Amino acid sequence: MTRPFADTSPARLEGYLGNQFLISMPQLKDDSFFKTVTLVCQHDRNGALGIVVNRLTDYSLGDIFKQLEINSSQIETDDIPVFEGGPVHQEFGLIVHTQDCQSKCWQSTLQISDSLALTSSKDILEDIAKGQGPEKYLMSLGYAGWGPSQLEAEVLSNAWITVPTEEALLFDDNIQDKWHRAANLIGVDLNLLTAQAGHA
């Protein structure tokens, strides 16, 4: 595995389906997104970027710290999972986290909402290792990406239903049931949906 962190320029989301969950419909058979919940971190006229939040890699956060030679002796990291964020650049590390830093933030951070952000710079991992990181966070390797108008077309073709993000569900340790529970936020029972079902 190559080094997962790289720097990107800070940016702020302007528009569309940002800060929404994308819940894959049962008929979406793409292996990368079958029964997934994806947090849309950025969506504008240039496309969209999201993080799948209910699939795990074989790595722990402790594995990442060891690879990056970050001393994490102050916290227990071997039981903290790393998510398979999507099929794009799976060597690229990203942290979805609560935006609760008042006096400092990290180098490469995309604001998702007033309370959520996405950071790609190594400094956030260094702070987590010191016990000075965000209150809640999850790490992914890779992300999901869509070109201009691609995500809109997929939603209109009933590949996805959209739900406002709920942070309690986003950071919930119960990964296995996230797909069903995310749909239940708007009263949808995915077991009852068919290929002809409409979208929300």
Image (cartoon, helix red, strand yellow):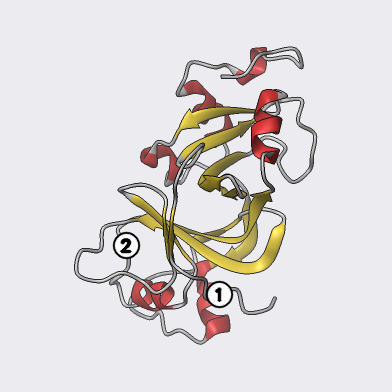
| Kind of residue at disc 1 | Phe
The residue that disc 2 covers is 134
SS assignment at label 1: loop
Distance between the alpha carbons at the discs numbered 2 and 1: 17 Å
In the rendered structure, the answer to whether residue 155 lies left or right of residue 140 reads right
Instruction: Please state the horizontal and vertical placement of residue 101, each as a whole percent of the image.
Output: 25, 63
Nearer mark to the viewer, of 2 and 1: 1
Figure check: 35 above or below 124: above
63 or 39, nearer to the observer: 39
Q: On the rendered image, what quadrant is the N terminus found in?
A: bottom right
Figure check: 58 above or below 104: above
The image quarter in which residue 105 lies: bottom left
Q: In the rendering, which numbered label is found on residue 5? A: 1
**Crowd rating for badge 1 (residues with CA inside 10 Å; few <14, some 14–19, many 20+):** many
Q: Residue furthest left?
A: 103
Instruction: Please state the horizontal and vertical placement of residue 156, each as a whole percent of the image.
Output: 67, 24
150 or 72, nearer to the observer: 150
First in sequence: mark 2 or mark 1?
1
In the rendered structure, the answer to whether residue 74 lies left or right of residue 58 reads left
Q: On the rendered image, what quadrant is the C terminus found in?
A: top right
The image quarter in which residue 189 lies: top right
In the rendered structure, the answer to whether residue 1 lies left or right of residue 93 reads right
Figure check: 89 above or below 193: below
| Kind of residue at disc 2 | Pro
Residue drawn at x 40%, y 79% as measured from the top left: 72
Q: In the rendering, which numbered label is found on residue 59? A: none
Instruction: Please state the horizontal and vertical placement of residue 148, each as a whole percent of the image.
Output: 67, 45
Residue drawn at x 45%, y 24% as measured from the top left: 185
Instruction: Please state the horizontal and vertical placement of residue 158, each as a whole percent of the image.
Output: 69, 23
Residue drawn at x 79%, y 39% as measured from the top left: 30
SS assignment at label 2: loop
**Crowd rating for badge 2 (residues with CA inside 10 Å; few <14, some 14–19, many 20+):** some
